[in-house]
Amino acid sequence: MKKILLSAVATILMAGTAMAEGYQINSLSTKQIGMGHTGVALKLGAENMYFNPAGMAYMDKTLDLTGSFTGIMPTATATVDGKEYETDNGVSTPISVNAAFSIYPNLKGGIAFYTPYGSSINWTDNWPGSVLNQNVSLKAFTIQPTLAWAINDKFSIGLGAMVTWATVDLNKGLVSASTADNVINAMKTLGQLPASVGSFGSTTPASVNLNGKTRIAVGFNIGAMYNVNDRLTFGASFRSKMDMKVKAGEAHVSYANELAQTLTGETIDLINNANFKAQMPCPWVLSLGASYKPVDRLTLAFDARLTGWHAYKSLDVEFLDEQLVQKGLNQYIPKHYKNSWCFSLGAQYALTERFDLRAGLMVDTSPVDKNYYNPETPGMTKIEPTLGLSFRPVPQLSIDLGFMYVAGTGIKGASCESPDLMGKAFLGKLMAAGMTPEQVAGIATKFNIPTTNKFTADYKLHAFIPSIGVSYSF
């Protein structure tokens, strides 16, 4: 049982640190949220540091300061055996702060702080998929110093260094309630428990909380911009892959009651003392864009972003203690993600010298293989219409509002296999007590005690994303 539960901790870490398109933030500028989060071929001043560093080279200000604060309010549902379960999520709050300054007329510098990944989901403690995930909170942070050079009026380049770290806080069930009840029935029949012992019903018998941090990872963000004429611009940028290495975290087990603790055994000390390492990719992102001004007051933009999720083939956890390695506790969980595209279309119209209106649309395709689908990331293709506006009470100051609605297209029959920890432990205990494989198999069949579970559900998702921003320049 101790071996099995140590293995569970590895699985927990992998689920908690997973990042798919559901965690990739597309709301790092209030202004650009209004335009479908376009920006690769737009001259945005300080905010170009995220979208395309080359665009910052055309900044016509001495100093440009911007900040955006966004609230992500998602709701996901899973339909299991005809019954719908809904998440109880809080509000995630990605931010972006940017400062750019002029060094020479054709050379600009700046520094940005933003949250490229970050979200949370809470499926509650006792839903049917609790052994895969109860709730998780993931936050990633990046500091990016940047330089941009306008080689001439037509062409510019930019380069930024991305310094990134992340934290994760995860709760996950260790034991399936249904398997625990079946084991209890088997133990009663075998005379190992009194007939008066109750059942768990829908209550998860044992859960674990895990807090972990990653080491700092360093990457780069490079871009180029070409002005065909005063009305048409093309841009391209590339954010490099970064490997986030997880340090040993702290795990704390909680039990539904005394019976749960008796059945699962004394595991807290082993879990708390287990040191491990894990690595996951923050994938590369290639962005291509074009902007066009058909008339002076109207700007149109289109971006296409390809994210290299193919790098996320598996999530591996390896223990540092050689004794645990020899016991086969290292975990290698297949993910088999594929590269995915996100397409953005946006428009901005200058209604007056002080008032701008914006609208946009994003289509964010999913990289997730539905045969390796874990509900810690309800990945699916998303349709995301957006609106926004800016008001300048004085020429130097802009107050911005943006709103995005996320409509997931849904996914049916998504499944995920996982080891049944209690089933394995109980059947292994029967073997160790001298039962033959045939006898153990008979008990497993009679009482429906599995060693592997396959969880299948239909998922839906939607989210409201309001944002407020402010910028000041002179």
Image: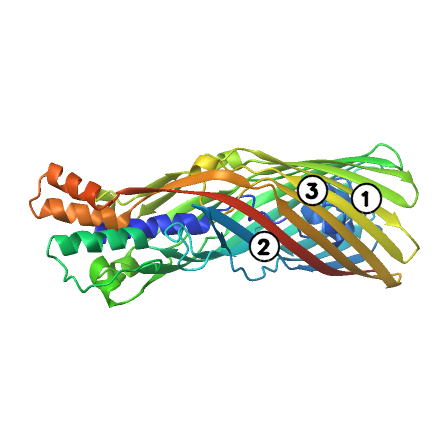
Q: Quadrant of residue 229?
A: top right
Which mark is drawn over residue 298? Answer: none
Please give the residue where the numbered disc 1 appears in the rendered image: 347
Q: x%, y% of residue 471?
A: 78, 60
Label 1 to label 2: alpha-carbon separation: 25 Å
Instruction: Give the secondary structure at mark 2.
Output: strand
Label 3 to label 2: alpha-carbon separation: 17 Å
Please give the residue where the numbered disc 3 appears in the rendered image: 362
- The answer to whether 225 is drawn above or below residue 193 in the figure is above
Identity of the residue drawn at 59% across and 54% down? 74
Q: x%, y% of residue 37?
A: 71, 46
Label 3 to label 1: alpha-carbon separation: 12 Å
Q: Amino acid at mark 1?
A: Ala
Which mark is drawn over residue 74? Answer: 2
Residue 67 seen in the current view: no
Q: Earlier in the sequence, mark 1 or mark 2?
A: 2
Q: x%, y% of residue 84?
A: 49, 51
Residue 394 seen in the current view: yes
Q: Nearer the viewer, mark 1 or mark 2?
A: 2
Identity of the residue drawn at 89% across and 61% down? 395
Instruction: Give the secondary structure at mark 1.
Output: strand
Q: Earlier in the sequence, mark 3 or mark 2?
A: 2
Choose between 167 and 165: the one closer to the eye: 167
Choose between 326 and 355: the one closer to the eye: 355
- The answer to whether 259 is drawn above or below residue 357 in the figure is below
